[in-house]
Image: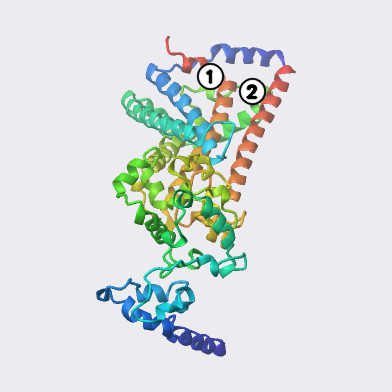
Amino acid sequence: MRAIRLISAIIFIAAVSLPARTIRNGAAQCLECHSDRSSGAVFIGQTAFASSVHGRLDCTDCHDESFEEFPHAQTSEGLSCMDCHSGKSGTMGVDFDAIDSQFSQSIHKTRRPDFRCTGCHNPHSFQAPSRRSSPSEVLIKDDNSVCLGCHKRDNKDILKRHGWLPHAKEHVSSLRCIDCHADQSASGEVVSHKIEKSSRALKECARCHQRDSYLLHSLYKFRREQQMNQKGFFNPVILNDSYVIGATRNYYLNLASIAIAAITLLAIAVHATLLWKSKKK
Amino acid sequence: MTGEEIVKDRQIKTDNVQVKYALWIRLWHTMNAAMFILAIVSGLNLQYASAGSPWGSFRLHILIHELSGKMLVISYVFFLVLNAKSGNVKHYAPQYKGLFQRLKLQLDYYLSGIFQRKPNPHNSDSKKFNPLQQISYLKMMYLLMPVIITTGTLMMFPGAISPKVFGISGYLLVALLHTATGFLASVFLPVHIYLSIIDNKTRIRDIFRLKR
C-alpha cells in the first residue's frame, strides 16, 4: 500500500513539474515579434498557440520557408490545411476528407469560393473539441464566438431572430449555432461542416426532442461516445446539466411507469369482468 | 341471492341518497377534467416525442400542454377559493379517528363485498366522500396538484430554476418531479372514472350537468 502511495506521489510530482507544452525553437524565434502587439506584425498569442493543437509545430511546417528571412519577401501565401489533414487516418483519426466534402457544400464555400478553413478556425489557437475538458457552457460560448466573429449580432438581435422558438433564450444559450444551422444528417463521424443558409436551418423541434436526438450526434457527440449507455441511471450524456424534453429519458423510470399504468388498467379490467359476471348470476 | 338479500339490494338502490353538487363544483370539475385530459395526451406526446410522429408535431403539443396547464392553474385557484369559501373543504379534511377501520371496510367492499351484492358501507353514512375517496382526493388536490403546478410553472419560466440543486441539475429535478407527479395524476384518472361508474352514490351525469 505504501509503495503504491509512493509511486502515485512520484507520478503526481513528475506530472505537475513537467513544463507545459513547449514551443519549438523556430516558432519561438518568430514569436519574438509575432507575440508582441507593438511590433505591428500579425499577432499570435504565445499561450494560446502553445496550448493549441498546432503548438508543437514549427511555423515553417505550414508557412513558406521564405518567411524565415526578415524582412519577409511576401506577405501572403496559399496555405492548405488539407496538405497535412487529408485522409481518414489523419490527425486524431478524424475524417478530414469528409469534413472537406461537407465544407465544399456549405453556404460559406458555395457563396465565396475563396473561403478557407482558417475563415472559422484560427490555426494558432485551435483546440480539438474532443480534447477539451471544459464544461459545455464554455465550449458553446467558444464555438459560437467563431460564428459571431463575422456574423456580428448583439444578444438582443439574436433573441429577436430566434423568437419563433419557445424559450429562445434557453435554446440560444445552451446550443451551438451549428447544431441547427449545419445539416446534421450529413454529420456522420464528424461534426457537420455543411453550414446551411438560414432559411434551411433546422426547425423541426422533434429532431432534437426525441430519444435519438440530433444533439447526441452533434453537441453531445463526444460525451456520448464516452458515456452512452441505454440503461444507465438517467442518460448521463445530456442530464449532467440540462433537461431536454423528449430526449432525456431514463430506461428504468419509463419501464416502471409503463408497468404501473398497465397493472392499474389490468386491475380495472379484472374487477369490471368479475363485477359483470357476479351481476349475471 | 336469497329473497331477503334481493329486498335489501333493492332498498339500497332506492334509499340511496344521491350526492348533489353545487354549480361551481360542476363548472370546476368539467373544466378540470377537460384540461387534464388535454394535458395528459400532450404530455405523453412530449415525453415520447419522435420526429414525424403521426400524433402531431412537437410544437403543437407544447402549445396544447402550455395552454391546458395555464387553464388548470386558473381552475385550481378557482377551486381553492370556492372550496374554502363554500365550506366544501370540510369533506377533504381527514378524520383520523377509526380511519384505518373505515378504509379497510371500504376496501373490503370493493375487493369482495361488491361481488356478493353486499351494501356499500358508504351508503349508510351521510358523508359526501367515502374514506378512500376522501384520502385520495385530499392527496390529489392538496399535494399532487400544487407540485404539478409549481414544477410546471417553473418549466414555463426556466430562468427561475437554479441550475444546481444539491449538486444535481435543477432543470432535471424540476422536470423529473413534474413528469412523475403528472404520471401519478394520470394513473388516478382511470381509477377515478371506474370507481365513479360502479359507485351507486354518484351519478356521473350529475357532476357534468351544467343546468339543474
Quadrant including the C terminus of chain A: top right
Of circles 2 and 1, which is in front?
Answer: 1
Determine whether B139 is above or below A142 in the image: above
Vertical order, A201 against A129 (above or below): above
Instruction: Tell me whether circle 2 and circle 1 mark residues in contact (CB < 8 Å).
Output: no
Q: Residue furthest right?
A: A281
Dot 1 alpha-carbon crowd within 10 angstroms: few under 14, some 14 to 19, many 20 or more: many
Say left or right for A178 vs B159: right
Q: Residue at x 57, y 64 (%)?
A: A94
For the residue carrying disc 2, how many other residues have a C-alpha within 10 Å: few (<14), some (14-19), or many (20+)? Answer: some
What distance separates the C-alpha of mark 2 from that of mark 1?
14 Å
Percent position (x, y) of residue A155? Answer: 31, 49
Q: Determine the residue positioned at 52% across, 53% down.
A: A104
The reply to whether residue A188 is visible in this rendering is: yes
Q: Nearer the viewer, residue B12 or A48?
A: A48
Q: Secondary structure at mark 2?
A: loop
Q: Residue furthest front?
A: A73
- Residue furthest to the top in view is B212
Please tell me whether mark 1 sits on a helix, a strand or a loop: loop
Residue A242: horizontal and vertical position, in percent?
45, 52
Residue type highlighted by circle 2:
Lys
Residue B201's disc is 1
Identify the residue under disc 2.
Answer: B118
Query: What residue is rendered at 53% in x and 43% in y?
Result: A207
Query: What amino acid is at disc 1?
Result: Lys
